[in-house]
Amino acid sequence: MTVHRIVTGDVSDSNIFLITGEKTLLVDTGKGFRVDTTISEIKKILDGRSLDMIVLTHCHTDHIGGLKPLMDEFDAEAMAGIGDAPYIANADPKYTLSWMFGIDLKSVDVTELVEGDIIDLKEHRLRVINTPGHTIGGICLYDEVTKAMFSGDTVFAMGVGRTDFESGSHQDIVNSLRKLNELDIGMLYPGHMNCTDNGNRAVEYGLMMMGGLR
């Protein structure tokens, strides 16, 4: 499995990660303001291959704004955690925060992912972990082979996602971080800012910030 970071040039975008192996998967799509750049970068990396799946770590527009044009371009299935998938599918402005970004989202078909689901990329297996707190339906993807984790806005290399938006919860994110702290995490691919090769340290730092260390 190779992880490519798609750079759109928009500093307010979420991180966008393209995973290539026997199958291909895109984690988050950015706001979509520069979706033509995103499409071009993905096509360059895929080099004629298809994009099999798009997984959204949560429902906020800076992570899902580019979804509809990417689905149209690549005919790829979209998936999201069961708690956030309806907000994405219905383009709910309140929960997606599309009003804040000034983006008119479109309704899309989204497959719901639940705790413990496995996204099988053949040589790698990404396990879905429910991590509410930033949003009620936020998820992380944990690679059972390499111990890498795609954490969305649940935890960053040096911090955690805000909990003061719709469906956010301080206690939920503490509980989610405690759950993640039980895993052996190597590389952490977060929703914003830099990646880190010590995921457990990032989770422990997040717990310390939120007053959740026991």
Image (spheres, rainbow, N blue to C red):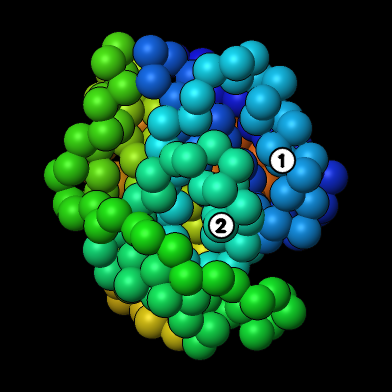
Q: Quadrant of residue 3?
A: top right
Q: Tell me: residue 109, above or below residue 198.
A: below
Q: Residue 134 got which mark?
A: none
Q: Residue at coordinates 62% horizontally, 62% vertically from top-left?
A: 65
**How many residues crowd around disc 1 within 10 Å: few (fewer than 14), some, or many (20 or more)?**
many
Q: Position of residue 114 (x, y in %)?
A: 19, 54
Q: Residue furthest left?
A: 116
Q: Is residue 138 visible?
A: no
Q: Residue 38 got which mark?
A: 1
Residue type, numbered disc 1: Thr
- CA–CA distance in space, label 2 to label 1: 13 Å
Q: Position of residue 134 (x, y in %)?
A: 44, 69
Q: Residue at coordinates 45% horizontally, 25% vertically from top-left?
A: 24
| Residue contact between numbered discs 2 and 1, judged by CB atoms under 8 Å | no
Q: Residue at coordinates 49% horizontally, 30% vertically from top-left?
A: 51
- Which one is in front, 140 or 39? 39
Residue type, numbered disc 2: Lys
| Foreground disc of the pair 2, 1 | 2
SS under mark 2: helix
Q: Tell me: residue 124, above or below residue 80.
A: above
Q: Quadrant of residue 18?
A: top right
Q: Residue 68 got which mark?
A: 2
* Image quarter (top left, top right, bottom left or bottom right) of the C terminus: bottom left
Q: Tell me: residue 102, above or below residue 71.
A: below
Q: Quadrant of residue 9?
A: top right
Relative to 42, is 87 on the left or the right?
A: left
